Amino acid sequence: MSGGLYRSANAHGGGQPPNDGATFISAEPLNQPGVAATAPPQEVVAETSAAANSAVMAIGSLVSRGTGFVRNLMIGAALGNAVGNVYTTAQFLPNQVYEFLLGGVLTSVLIPVLVRRRKIDPDRGEAYAQRLLTLAVLTLAAAALLAVISAPVLTAIYAAGKDNTYKGLVNDLSYLMLPMLFFTGVSALIAAVLNTRGHFAAPMWAPILNNLVVIGVFGLYIGVYGAKALQPGQMTPGRILLVGGGTLLGVAVQAAGLLPALRKVGFRWKWRFDFRELGLRELGRLGAWMFCYVAINQLGLFVVVNLLTRAAGKENAGLLIYNNVFLLLMMAHGIIAVSIITALMPRMSAAAAEGRLRDVTADLSRGTRMVSAVLAPVAVCYAVLAGPISVVIFRYGAFTGENAVATSTVLLVAAVGLVPFAISQLFTFAFYALPDTKTPAMINIPVVALRVLLQIGLFLAFSATFAAAGMMLGNAISYLAAAVISAMLLRPRVGRIGLGAIMRTLGRVLVAALGAALVGLLVVRLLPGDPANLSWLAAAVQLVIGGVVIGGTYLGLAMALRIGEITEVVGMVRRRLGR
């Protein structure tokens, strides 16, 4: 249900498909104080190990997102908006093919099957994993070759409505970048094998290698060719080879970086062609609904790409800006919401398996209230400080001030969808805890249909300059619809989800958020800087001071309104500082 442009290896940590962001795992279970004090020695060791793994993954997630932003900054600075839109379209193609082939099925089907075979097979699932990797490598290689051959067809579909110069550059870059789907798929499968053997560090840190390579490539591009805003027809063969080949190199390095970890966990590569032993019929049955979920999402993304490609212009917000803003949303969601969801998921799964549905609804209600309370001030900052954020993070080199203004408009609208998106994802995970992959897939059909209709309607009703913001508005409304439909369908399955408590908390959160927004707007207006032509220094001052004021105002109002989720976090911080 994401509505994100693409989910490349550098954009997520290989977690569940609905996450659309890197997974941050909390080291502490919710509502379990004093575990370490009462646990037997062996459990203390296990908990310490889990905490250490979580810390590694958390740090890796933050570093990955940080380098990912630098990566996107360098792309915008080197290519500018016009060529950046073409580059983003070309990069989207291999990622969409990958999602169709493997993306959603990986976590929902392959990882659970690998875990089960590791427990029941005499060789702890090694032969099964070897067969699976053999089949996947052959399938991905064939798919990559077919995709490269079909590059002109894919270009014609996704760059419809553009001139031949635009299509020609997309096509040239696609020849170089479509093989990415092979390395992306291999990376994901190796990460799955490592995770089932208790190794989490390498899969979390490997995407950072990808980011660093791409950062270096675009740094070299700027050093050789300069940071100039070009049109697609001005891209020379040397520029195309450096940009497309360098992006492919980054994904290849990421895949290669995982190979030493396979040896470390004792896994040995061996070609096995007895694919009947994989139980392909079972894999197909288990993955059918998740494939449906992914396929519907990809059809929705196809509409976004085509509409934004048609709207792309010198100053219009196109694919590059849309994707930059979406990654900003996923940063907040991944660090805050996913950590809460990940902490609740094992609890809800265990409670559902044991028939303790009241515990499921209690965790679901608490998670909804906590996600809303914690993400609300972030959404306010994104909306109120959209201009300063866009200038400070993105306005470098060929990415002009006009591009930054266009980015701020998209970010302002996108902020509305942050909390609904997180809530809809939490409800989706509640279905997975039951376990049920069919219902989320069925919900996704009307949700994506609503999103597409809204996006097409907004595109036709407004000018091209509002196209990317219109896509984000369609996303936000569809996220809200997904949350409402999911809640309605969850209630017959698990009982009352505490709607009264949720609505009371949401009401208080809304009051605190509006108060913080008003104070933030007032302070930003009083600070120096022309909103239409904001310098980097003025933007940085507005961002720092405005962020502190918004955060402080929200916290004060939340304490005054007794929003329990905020007072609980504040109390926990105070206790830890006291220690």
Image (cartoon, rainbow, N blue to C red):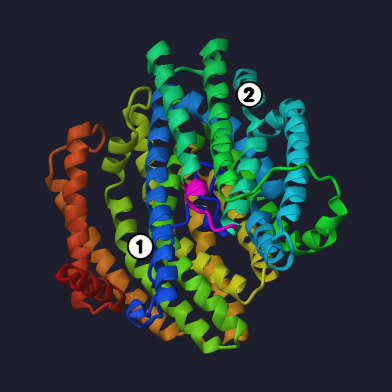
Query: Mark 2 against mark 1, which lies toward the viewer?
Result: 2
Q: Read off the magenta span.
A: 197-204
Whether residue 83 can be seen here: yes
Mark sitting earlier along the chain (2/1) = 2
Q: Is residue 557 left or right of residue 129?
A: left
Horizontal and vertical percent for residue 8? 55, 42
Horizontal and vertical percent for residue 372? 38, 68
**SS at badge 1:** helix
Q: Which label belongs to residue 176? A: 2
Q: State the residue in front, 351 or 330.
A: 351
Q: Quadrant of residue 352?
A: bottom right
Horizontal and vertical percent for residue 105? 68, 56
Q: Is residue 402 above or below residue 477?
A: above
**Residue drawn at 37 percent across, 27 percent down:** 399
Q: Is residue 397 left or right of residue 289?
A: left
Q: Which label belongs to residue 397? A: none
Q: Within the magenta stretch, is there residue 44? A: no
Q: Within the magenta stretch, is there residue 200? A: yes
Query: Where does label 1 land, which residue?
Result: 375
Q: Is residue 206 above or below residue 566?
A: above
Amino acid, disc 2: Leu
Horizontal and vertical percent for residue 299? 67, 48
Quarter of the picture containing the C terminus is bottom left
